Image (cartoon, rainbow, N blue to C red):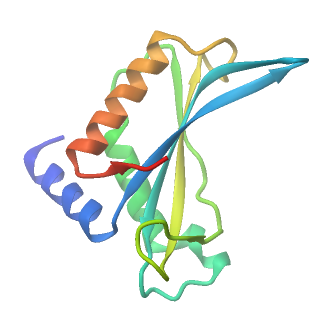
């Protein structure tokens, strides 16, 4: 990411209070739960926007999250399938600003093409690169 893009991304993170959390992506096979990857959920605060829940997925806030996600996904992630989920139409109560709402966008990191095996070093490396990029832009992890 060049300096101008990084500066613009930091401004977006600050202005929209963008933060993230990380969850394991699991597959259940009988009694076993197998971790096949990770889900990084990006959150943006929509303070004062007065969105209705059905509008959240197509809002400018979701577009900001998508643009940010596209910038932080590492160019090299061989062996790991990386996808952006369609933003949910839901609004969530903000954990950052009282009385505000948030929108979310998920980045899925799966082993192989579709989570066809247990997560390993390539998924860990991809997750580490995404986490580092977000933290460098000022986004905090909130679990």
**Considering only vertical position in the picture, is 72 above or below 11?**
above
- Residue 81: x and y, percent? 54, 25
Residue 16 falls in image quadrant: bottom left
**Considering only vertical position in the picture, is 100 above or below 79?**
below
Regarding residue 36, the answer to whether it shows in the image is yes
Residue 2 falls in image quadrant: top left
Q: Is residue 125 left or right of residue 102?
A: left
Q: Is residue 93 left or right of residue 97?
A: right
- Residue 91: x and y, percent? 60, 72
Which residue sits furthest right?
30
**Considering only vertical position in the picture, is 87 above or below 52?**
above
Q: Residue at x 27, y 39 (%)?
A: 133
Q: Nearer the viewer, residue 12 or 4?
A: 12
**Considering only vertical position in the picture, is 25 above or below 138?**
above
Regarding residue 74, the answer to whether it shows in the image is no
Q: Is residue 1 left or right of residue 17?
A: left
Q: Quadrant of the N terminus?
A: top left
Q: Nearer the viewer, residue 112 or 26?
A: 26
Number of dots carrying numbers? 0
Q: Residue at x 67, y 76 (%)?
A: 54
- Residue 97: x and y, percent? 41, 74
Q: Residue at x 44, y 76 (%)?
A: 46
Q: Residue at x 39, y 55 (%)?
A: 19
Residue 124 falls in image quadrant: top left
């Amino acid at each position: 990411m060049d300096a101008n893009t990084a500066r613009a991304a930091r401004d977006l993170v600050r202005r929209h209070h963008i933060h993230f959390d990380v969850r394991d992506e699991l597959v259940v096979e009988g009694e076993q739960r197998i971790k096949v990857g990770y889900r990084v959920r990006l959150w943006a605060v929509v303070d004062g926007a007065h969105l209705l829940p059905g509008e959240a997925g197509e809002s400018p806030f979701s577009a900001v999250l998508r643009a940010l996600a596209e910038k932080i996904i590492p160019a090299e992630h061989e062996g790991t399938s990386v996808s952006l989920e369609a933003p949910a139409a839901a609004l969530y109560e903000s954990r950052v600003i009282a009385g505000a709402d948030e929108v979310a966008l998920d980045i899925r990191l799966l082993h192989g093409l579709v989570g066809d095996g247990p997560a390993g070093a390539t998924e860990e490396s991809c997750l580490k690169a995404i986490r580092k990029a977000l933290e460098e832009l000022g986004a905090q992890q909130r679990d």
